[in-house]
Structures are given as structure tokens and as C-alpha cells.
Amino acid sequence: MENDDKIANENKIMATTKKRNVYKPEFKAKVALEAVRGRLTINQISKQFGVHSNQISKWKKQFLESLPQIFDNSKQSSSEQQEELTNQLYQQIGHTTR
């Protein structure tokens, strides 16, 4: 009985220290595009690329939701927006310290 508890505790420690997989954006795009194409089922794609089917579904959803932004030329890039905001904040700080 005591030995079973020891094994269970070891498994808990191992489970909490397991590293998460980190995928490159290019790989995510490739998998998501394959899912959007619809030639294979999500399960087939999962086996082919070694990624869980839930993760593939999430990437596919992100892919489809971000498509309209690609064609939207009216918006500034996020780095330009961030730079503009930073400049405005520096101006405000300059006004309050005078």
C-alpha cells in the first residue's frame, strides 16, 4: 500500500514538470491550412503532424478569424500603434513635469 502511494506521488511530480510543446508559427500555419483545406479529417491531420486534435481546431479557428485582417489596409501595424501611443504618453509626462 505504501509503495502504491509512493508511485502515485512520483507520477504527480512527473506530470507537473512535463514541458509544454512550443510550435513555430510556420508549423502552426501549415497545420491550420491543412485543416482549412478539408482534404483530411482533423484526426488524420493529428496523426500526420503529431498534434492533438483540439489544438488543430484552435489553430484553424485562429487562422480563419485572422484572415480578414490580412486584407485590411486601413489599420496601422501594431508596432506603429504602439510607437504612436508611446510618443503620446511621453508628451503627457513632459507636460506634467513642467
Image (spheres, rainbow, N blue to C red):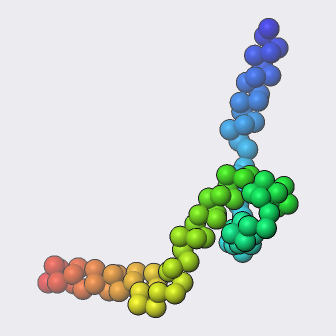
Question: Residue shown at 73%/67% (left/top)?
Answer: 38
Residue 47 image point, x, y percent:
84, 55
On the question of residue 8 being in view, the answer is yes
Q: In this view, does 64 lie above or below 10?
A: below
User: Residue 54 appears at what percent x and percent y?
Assistant: 67, 52
Asked which quadrant contains residue 26, the reply is bottom right
- Residue 61 higher or lower than 68, as above or below: above
Rendered view: 7 above or below 48: above
x and y, in percent, of residue 97 in the image: 17, 80
Residue at the extreme front of the image, as rendered: 39
Q: In which quarter of the image is the N terminus?
A: top right
Residue at the location (64% across, 65% down)? Answer: 60
Residue furthest to the top in view is 1
**What residue is shown at x 80% (from left), y 63% (from top)?**
40
Report the residue at 35% width, 81% height from top.
Answer: 86
Res. 24 in view: no
Front one among 19 and 29: 29
Q: Nearer the viewer, residue 17 or 52?
A: 52
Residue 56, position as x, y percentages in the image: 69, 59
The answer to which of 44 and 70 lies nearer the viewer is 44
Q: In this view, does 71 lie above or below 11?
A: below
The C terminus, quarter of image = bottom left
Tell whether 85 sits left or right of 91. right
